[in-house]
Image (cartoon, helix red, strand yellow):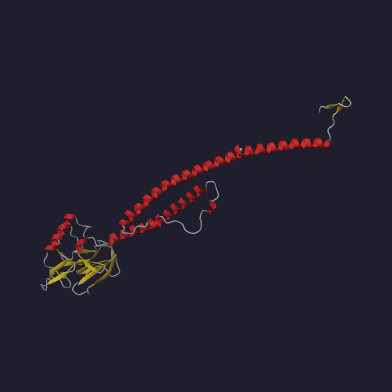
Amino acid sequence: MSKIKYKFNTKSLTYEKVTVPVRKRVWQVLSYLATGLVFATITIILAFKYFPSPREKQKQREIEELTLQFELLNNRMNEVTEVLSDIETRDNNIYRTIFEAEPIPTSIRKAGFGGVDRYKELHGYNNSDLMIETSKRLDRISKQLYIQSKSFDEVVKLVKGKVQLLASIPAIQPIANEDLRHQPSGFGWRTHPIYKTPEFHPGMDFSAPQGTEIRATGDGTIARADAAAQGYGNHVVISHGYGYETLYGHMLKFVVRPGQKVKRGQLIGYVGSTGLSTAPHVHYEVHKNGQIVNPINFYYNDLTPEQYQKMIELSEQSSQSFD
């Protein structure tokens, strides 16, 4: 209940009731409201500026958590990068070296990404730098992993090829001769057994009883099996691939045919004395890329170092070949 106000009239020396016009009352109310609104607005602005709301606090906690996760992710990428770097080093300096393959250049492994800005959608945020750098590192690691994966695919192929190469190289003697009881006649200049003149002997001769088994010295394909070549009599030529060929001459007979696949140690014929020969033996040659090479360099699969040294001594002592 509003109080009634009075004022003293000095002229009439009486108290008169105070009446406030409606317009004035309205302006008073409006002024009170305006003042309150101004103070309320200022209070709200200050509150929002210096005192975050619960929703803002929640968002801030989420941002802090995401920033922490980005930092942890970067730490894990550091570990992945170190491991990947070690794998790349092993790949270049061990695996690819073993299999005689060229190492992958660092310029290829570490190549960047060209073209348009790949990370433009990450600009404009408070943590843009962190997000962009993390994305770049992920892209670099992904590319390095892809290149390394392709490299290992190539190494696997090289391993398979190396296994086949090792099986194909002529690496044993053409007849069983572990105890070296079959006297070899070596590679090089020898006295021809018939003409008695110095002549280059392009292989090794192994004396053996007629009918002794002759075996392939490496995996390959029979290229020839005939008596058409002058002087060799019944002979077999095996193409081993990788530039290698072997020839087995003066056979009593052969048991293979052209185009047939053979494995190292497989029977291909028997010792004889056909062609230009003075006694039963097998004449054995090794060709590499079309060039005749000394067969004595290829017996490492069935001779000990001591036996190999003795083989060299025996082959060098022989002054006359058998063919």
What is the residue that sits farthest to the right in this orientation?
A: 12
Q: Is residue 5 above or below residue 186?
A: above
**x and y percentages locating residue 161 in the rendered image:** 33, 60
Q: Nearer the viewer, residue 80 or 308?
A: 80
Q: Residue at x 66, y 38 (%)?
A: 42
Quadrant in the rendering for residue 318 = bottom left
Q: Residue at x 81, y 36 (%)?
A: 24
Q: Nearer the viewer, residue 118 or 73?
A: 118
Quadrant in the rendering for residue 9 = top right
Quarter that holds the N terminus: top right
Quarter that holds the C terminus: bottom left
The reply, left or right, for residue 20 in relation to residue 201 is right
Q: Please indicate, yes or no, whether residue 87 appears anywhere in the rendered image.
A: yes
**x and y percentages locating residue 189 in the rendered image:** 14, 68
Q: Is residue 202 above or below residue 99?
A: below
**x and y percentages locating residue 80 in the rendered image:** 41, 48
Q: Nearer the viewer, residue 209 or 45?
A: 45
**x and y percentages locating residue 243 in the rendered image:** 28, 66
Q: Is residue 98 above or below residue 250?
A: above
Q: Is residue 44 above or below residue 127?
A: above
Q: Residue at x 72, y 36 (%)?
A: 35
What is the residue that sits farthest to the front in this orientation?
A: 11
Q: Nearer the viewer, residue 159 or 35?
A: 35
Q: Please indicate, yes or no, whether residue 52 appears anywhere in the rendered image.
A: no
